[in-house]
Amino acid sequence: MAKPRVFVSRRLPEVALERISRECDMDLWPGELPPPRDALLEHVRGCEGILCLLTDRIDAEVMDASECLRVISNYAVGYDNIDLAAADERRIQVGNTPGVLTETTADLAFALLLAAARRIVEADRYTRSGEWRTWGPTLLLGQDVHHAALGLVGFGRIGREMAKRARGFDMSVQYFDAVRNEDAESELGARFVDLDTLLATSDFVSIHVPLTDATRHMIGERELDLMKPTAILVNTSRGPVVDRRALYAALRDRRIAAAGLDVFEQEPISKDDPLLGLDNVVVTPHIGSASVAARTKMALMAAENLIEGVNCRPIPYKVNPEIDSDFRCCGLDCDQAT
């Protein structure tokens, strides 16, 4: 019996590719950059499964490129790159990789917070350039992290991990979320407040919400103006949650002290973007989950979603459970065929 045909849109850790190739007829995109739109459509034709990255836009046109497409496995926790309504309409299972990158991403968010607070990147450049001539009382003064107030916009898995890390620095923690979590408040010593209060009273604001219509440009000019002039903004969620132009103006005019950014409205960020010309911004290239352990586990989870889906079985990490028992199948001699 022929193996199910699948398209994998980027090279993953080898252990996952080996597993996929054992179970499937794998078409692997060879380039470092995402496949162009026309190439994506061409490679998806005739495929029963797609394993994609958040940089791949998987919409109705892509889904309709293959009449036998049964599963879309996203190598990420977020899935705003996938038209979920279109997938539901076509009864295509969609999977992600939840949980495994929670602590790793929180580590990076706290690293950005510390780096921006203590001006680590500026200090590194200053030292390497030969400008450092002596110890000075006012040289590269930053903000204390210990005993400061941390405001978490979003109190899901990653937000709660940030609260755990903050306890080690004796920080006070407050959060805003669409859903209050009183159990986590009690466990982590966090206080629920409205967004305006959080912005106005926090020394550090760290964003941990998914990108939705409600959260797009959630932090704009009005919200940035509420923040303290000594406050620092950290974003490791999705770039469009923050209005880029408003953030640039606030940082340029020193209406907030600094920012630590792992995500951007346009990725990759252009080398000519004015944000990169500011010395009070620490930037990283969307590496929140970039540890060997986390990325390998993500790859194995994505591979498992893909393999289960092409074999007409419910996938283990599904984001559209409403089609749990009525998903598209091969229609052959299969227990799950509908």
Image (cartoon, rainbow, N blue to C red):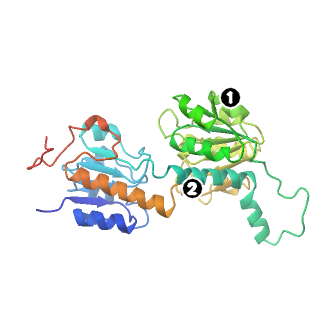
Disc assigned to residue 197: 1
Q: Where is 279 relative to 184, above or below?
A: below
Q: Secondary structure at mark 2?
A: loop
Residue 301, percent from left and from top: 36, 54
Q: Quadrant of the N terminus?
A: bottom left
Q: Pointer 2: what residue?
A: 269
Label annotation for residue 161: none
Q: Is residue 73 above or below residue 207?
A: below
Q: Residue at x 70, y 55 (%)?
A: 115
Residue lying farthest front? Answer: 187
Say left or right for 63 vs 213.
left
Amino acid on which the number 2 mark rests in the picture: Ile
Name the residue type under label 1: Thr
Q: Furthest-left residue in view? A: 333
| Residue under the image location 36 percent in, 67 percent down | 15
Please, is residue 60 above or below residue 114 in the view?
Answer: above
Q: Place residue 195 in its image quadrant.
A: top right
Quadrant where the C terminus is found in the figure: top left
Which callout, 2 or 1, points to the residue nearer the camera? 1
- Label 1 packing within 10 angstroms: few (<14), some (14-19), many (20+): some
Q: Position of residue 295 (x, y in %)?
A: 45, 60
